[in-house]
Image (tube, rainbow, N blue to C red):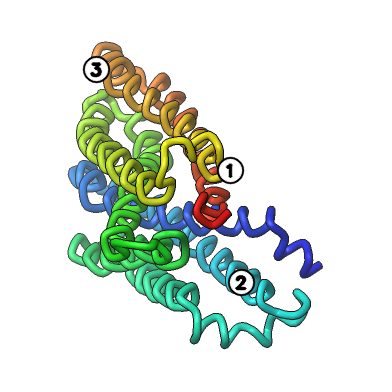
Amino acid sequence: MIGALVSAGAQAVARGLVLAGIMVVIGATLFLLRIAPLFAGDSTQAQQVARRTRRLLRLACLVLALAAVWRLVQQSAAFADVPSAWPSMVLLVLTQMAWGTGWGVQMTGLLLAVLASGAATRRRGAIVPLGIGALILATSPAMMGHAIGAPRLVPLVVFADTLHVLAAGGWLGTLLVVAVAALPLASHAAAPGRAIAILDRFSPIALTSAVLIALTGVFASWMHLETLGALWSSTYGRTLLVKLGILAGVAALGAYNWRVATPALQASGDTRAIRRSALVELTLAALLVAVTAVLVATPLPSEM
């Protein structure tokens, strides 16, 4: 049983769940800050939006907590003589390894997010501690992956990686919360105005995030690949190309929503097209997270 839980495939699944959980926490924070206030004029819908957001946020925190503990078991098993002896390595991993420090940071951010999640959906001022928790969570992948082990410019690489995670959550995490908590209610409104207002608020978040993802991604590629040829001659580079291909598909759908689906909504008031497009975009986002979970554990060309 323990062998299956610590296998390479299981590790990729656990990393993917951790990344997804962090992105949803970031997205929920931005949603509550920028988009949820659009429902303030309708107390019934405002309560429904708050309830849906709270449920999604708590589900993300639960998934993140379980996946983080799973990752600790996997990391401990990697240093044990046999996987079943993983408990004997937990203290070593947490106190003497950079990965353990990152895990502690992750748990700190998660605890803050859990404590703030209920209040943040009820009181606007309570979004601040949730945002701090989201920011702490966003730093943790950098402290547990390639960024912290960079051969040079480590603070800059960690900062860029944190910004990359924040941007991914800002774009795709917020999109998920919009699709689950806002658009279904807006589609039942008497007029399409609220759905259009939601997209008007979301579009700048998505566009800014996309630019940040591109810039930080180029920087990370330059740091980790070292040569252009490594992009197709190494496993890391080829996996990165797959990620870039999926990201291009997500970006194309985002551009479609912005330039085609949103104007169509303004003209007809029908939200079905934009909801279908958002669903496809989120499906590609799930694939993107899965590939990223593999990429962060793939040896760099310099390590081969």
The answer to whether the residue labelled 2 contacts the one labelled 3, judged by CB atoms less than 8 Å apart, is no
The residue sitting at 22% across, 65% down in the picture is 128
* Structural crowding at the residue carrying mark 2, measured as other residues with C-alpha within 10 Å and reported as few (<14), some (14–19) or many (≥20): many
Vertical placement of 58 versus 200: above or below?
A: below
| Mark 3–mark 1 distance (CA, rounded to whole Å) | 45 Å
Secondary structure found at label 3: helix
User: Which circle's residue, 2 or 3, is located before the other in the chain?
Assistant: 2
Residue closer to the observer: 229 or 165: 229
Give the residue type that dot 2 points to. Answer: Gln
The residue sitting at 57% across, 49% down in the picture is 294
The answer to whether the residue labelled 3 contacts the one labelled 1, judged by CB atoms less than 8 Å apart, is no
Q: Quadrant of residue 222?
A: top left
Relative image position of residue 74 (x, y in whole percent) = 65, 69
Which one is in front in this view, the residue at disc 2 or the one at disc 1? Answer: 1
Q: Which residue is mark 1?
A: 235
| Mark 2–mark 3 distance (CA, rounded to whole Å) | 51 Å
The answer to whether the residue labelled 2 contacts the one labelled 1, judged by CB atoms less than 8 Å apart, is no
Vertical placement of 276 versus 289: above or below?
A: above
Secondary structure found at label 1: helix
Residue closer to the observer: 136 or 194: 136
Relative image position of residue 96 (x, y in whole percent) = 50, 85
